């Protein structure tokens, strides 16, 4: 069971002064993990974001600054991805976090050790971020009931939500090889489409390219083939959360998804934010799960937690903004399209992981479980253009006078995530960004 501790103290400040700014995504209370490279030929190193710097964990370990379980965790940060650290488990993650917090806080010995800062810190502006884990498997769920209802109403107005939705977490197996870090350009995919009035399908670039605002949960310790992870143990198998944009070709999806579901409409690219905010860092922002309306079925026993129920959800806002090529050329700021929140998910992270293993499917460190598009009850909480424009029927009008039903070449889509509440320091996730090219 995870509990708050001294690392969450809102009074903590860091000797890395940029971390003390209210605008920083990465205060000392956050300490997210990622993999950075100094240049294109660098395979990458494990780091922790703190203000406008990256803490090099290989250098921290080499300096002898870690002890006990923290030293063991630091030793597992010597590679080019986070998988070894993710596989260790909670007591090692917590020990490393506590020791890094002590190292970086104001008044620590490290602040006064000549030359140490230069040996263990790297300016964040000078590095390239990699995908943080070697992702063996990627599963995308459909955990937002608002999104599922909105999409269903576009295709089945009289029966928008299929009868199984409130009983079983719906998901599909995604493509791990096309997961890319924030900032990677996204090529408009080719695909087979068939308009309703056409006699036969044609092949060409998608005309209905969309984004999906999601969160992704990285698996920590895995499970053995044939074993099931109980709902009360599920979160001990989760390391942390990133932002996910599961780009979608809606016209391709409409033609191909029956009878087996999404395929080429999704597999061309999925963008993730490179910093993984740990579940330890998220503790001050845990909330009860979404209240199920009267008449909804209770979760089946294997999905019904018996402890930690009041903290099964997470208060995590995701903001999506758009800037077109013309907007950038005219020096105009990006516009916000939506702001949704993971607290509104119908299924919790623990339920998603437990259901995933309920048939004996094994999970491995570094596997990624995404939530699916997160939408809320109001228009400004809709997490995709499919919903915002009603499948293109009501295009958005932008400040330039341009109109958007779906994304055009040159469009920048940027997602940002943050956790805020009274009595806690705001923490962020950095950007999950991509530009469309033809």
Image (cartoon, rainbow, N blue to C red):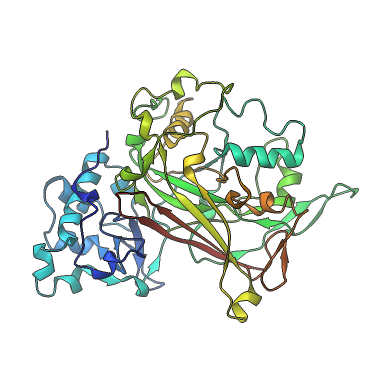
Looking at this view, name the residue that lies furthest to the top.
301
Looking at the rendered structure, the number of numbered marks drawn on it comes to: 0
Q: Position of residue 348 (x, y in %)?
A: 46, 35
- Left or right, residue 158 beside residue 368: right
* Quadrant that contains the N terminus: top left
Q: Position of residue 265 (x, y in %)?
A: 67, 50
Q: Position of residue 119 (x, y in %)?
A: 18, 71
Q: Is residue 234 visible?
A: no
* Quadrant that contains the C terminus: bottom right
Q: Position of residue 301 (x, y in %)?
A: 45, 18
Q: Nearer the viewer, residue 325 or 14?
A: 14
Give the residue at x 48% y 44%: 342
Is the residue 107 above or below the residue 244 in the image? below
Q: Nearer the viewer, residue 41 or 112?
A: 112
Looking at this view, name the residue that lies furthest to the front.
422
Is the residue 307 above or below the residue 14 in the image? above
Looking at this view, name the residue that lies furthest to the bottom.
330
Q: Is residue 15 visible?
A: yes
Q: Nearer the viewer, residue 298 or 63?
A: 298
Give the residue at x 60% y 52%: 380
Q: Nearer the viewer, residue 242 or 224?
A: 242
Give the residue at x 56% y 21%: 297
Give the residue at x 18% y 71%: 117
């Amino acid at each position: 069971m995870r509990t708050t501790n001294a690392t969450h103290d809102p009074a903590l400040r860091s000797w890395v002064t940029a971390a003390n700014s209210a605008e920083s995504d990465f205060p000392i209370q956050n300490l997210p993990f990622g993999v950075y490279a100094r240049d294109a030929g660098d395979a990458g190193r494990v780091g922790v974001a703190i203000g406008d710097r990256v803490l090099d964990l290989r250098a921290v370990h080499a300096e002898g600054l870690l002890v006990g379980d923290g030293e063991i965790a630091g030793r597992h940060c010597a590679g080019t991805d986070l998988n070894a650290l993710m596989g260790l488990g909670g007591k090692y993650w917590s020990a490393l976090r506590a020791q890094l917090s002590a190292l970086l806080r104001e008044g620590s010995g490290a602040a006064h050790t000549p030359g140490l800062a230069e040996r263990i810190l790297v300016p964040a502006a000078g590095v390239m971020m990699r995908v943080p884990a070697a992702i063996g498997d990627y599963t995308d769920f459909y955990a937002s009931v608002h999104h599922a209802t909105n999409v269903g109403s576009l295709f089945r107005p009289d029966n928008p939500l299929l009868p199984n939705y409130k009983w079983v977490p719906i998901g599909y197996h995604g493509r791990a090889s096309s997961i890319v870090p924030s900032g990677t350009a996204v090529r408009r995919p080719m695909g087979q489409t068939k308009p309703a009035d056409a006699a036969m399908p044609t092949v060409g670039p998608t005309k209905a390219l969309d984004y999906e605002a999601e969160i992704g949960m990285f698996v920590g310790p895995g499970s053995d083939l044939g074993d099931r992870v109980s709902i009360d143990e599920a979160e001990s198998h989760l390391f942390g959360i990133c932002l996910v944009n599961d780009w979608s070709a809606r016209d391709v999806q409409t033609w191909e998804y029956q009878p087996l579901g999404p395929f080429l409409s999704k597999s061309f690219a999925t963008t993730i934010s490179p910093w993984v905010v740990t579940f330890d860092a998220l503790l001050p922002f845990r909330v009860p799960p979404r209240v199920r309306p009267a008449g909804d079925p209770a979760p089946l026993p294997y999905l019904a937690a018996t402890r930690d129920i009041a903290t099964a959800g997470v208060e995590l806002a995701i903001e999506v903004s758009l800037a077109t090529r013309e907007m950038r050329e005219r020096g105009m700021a990006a516009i916000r399209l939506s702001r949704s929140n993971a607290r509104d998910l119908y299924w919790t992270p623990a339920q998603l992981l437990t259901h995933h293993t309920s048939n004996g499917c094994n999970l491995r460190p570094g596997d990624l479980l995404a939530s699916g598009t997160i939408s809320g009850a109001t228009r400004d909480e809709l997490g995709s253009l499919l919903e915002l424009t009603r499948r293109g029927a009501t295009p958005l009008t932008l400040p330039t006078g341009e109109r958007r039903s779906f994304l055009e070449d040159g469009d920048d889509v940027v997602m940002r995530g943050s956790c805020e509440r009274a009595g806690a320091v705001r923490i962020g996730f950095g950007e999950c960004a991509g530009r469309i090219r033809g």
